[in-house]
Image (cartoon, rainbow, N blue to C red):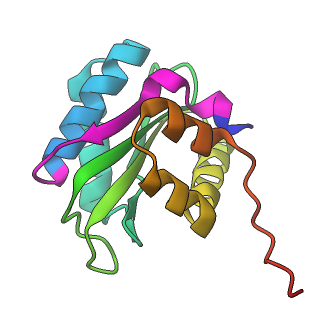
Amino acid sequence: MKITDIIDARAVMPQLKALNKKQVLQDIAQQLASLIAIDQRIIFETLLTREKLGSTGLGQGIAIPHGRIPGLSRVTGLFAKLTPAIDYDAVDGKPVDLVFALLSPDHAGADHLTALAKISRIMRTPAALAKLRASNTAEALYAVLTEPVNTAPASAA
């Protein structure tokens, strides 16, 4: 599975302005609904239900809200850059400014976990985070998200 199998260029929100986590999830649900033809209330409730289990704010300004939706045909993602960062109840207590939402069909066991791992790898790469935070257009953000991730440690020269 490649990141381009999960997200396309229309699923990037370069300047999402929200006051709180609930509004972020509502705005993301609305945008995803327009892309995948699933009712935005179902998407919102799925993401909110997952948040009630524990925050998907992973720290370092990153959140990966996710859930499974019956009737969805494929794993689908959306990236949003928040301006400004908001309190998201992240594990490190810091505000979140980068959100990658992931929806999977209810039967997509391994694919859901594979997609989460792929997104997590990108979002944990310092170079990718720096580029995402420095980019302000949907095109630039999508380019960063879809470029190969180098997770190898830098060699000492």
Is 76 positioned to the left or the right of 32 in the image?
right
Q: Quadrant of residue 78?
A: top left
Residue 123 position (above or below residue 2) = below
Residue 57 seen in this snapshot: yes
What number of labels is visible?
Answer: 0
* Rendered location of residue 1, percent (x, y): 74, 37
In this rendered view, identify the residue nearer to me: 135 or 38.
135
Residue 32 horizontal/vertical position (percent):
36, 25
Using the image, determine if residue 20 lies above or below residue 109. below
Q: Which residues are magenta?
A: 4-21
Q: Nearer the viewer, residue 63 or 145?
A: 145
**Residue 61 placement (x, y as % from top left):** 36, 66
Question: Which residue is nearer to you in this view: 120 or 41?
Answer: 120
In magenta segment, residue 16: yes
- Does the magenta segment cover residue 62? no
In which image quadrant can residue 33 be found? Answer: top left
User: Residue drawn at (36%, 38%), measured in percent from left and top?
Assistant: 14
**137 vs 89: above or below:** above
- Residue 69 seen by the camera: no
Q: Quadrant of the C terminus?
A: bottom right
Name the residue at 52% across, 25% down. Answer: 9
Considering every residue shown, the one lying at the far bottom of the view is: 156
Q: Residue 126 location, x and y as percent?
A: 58, 69
Tell me which residue sits at (61%, 64%) in the image.
Answer: 127
Residue sticking out furthest to the top: 37
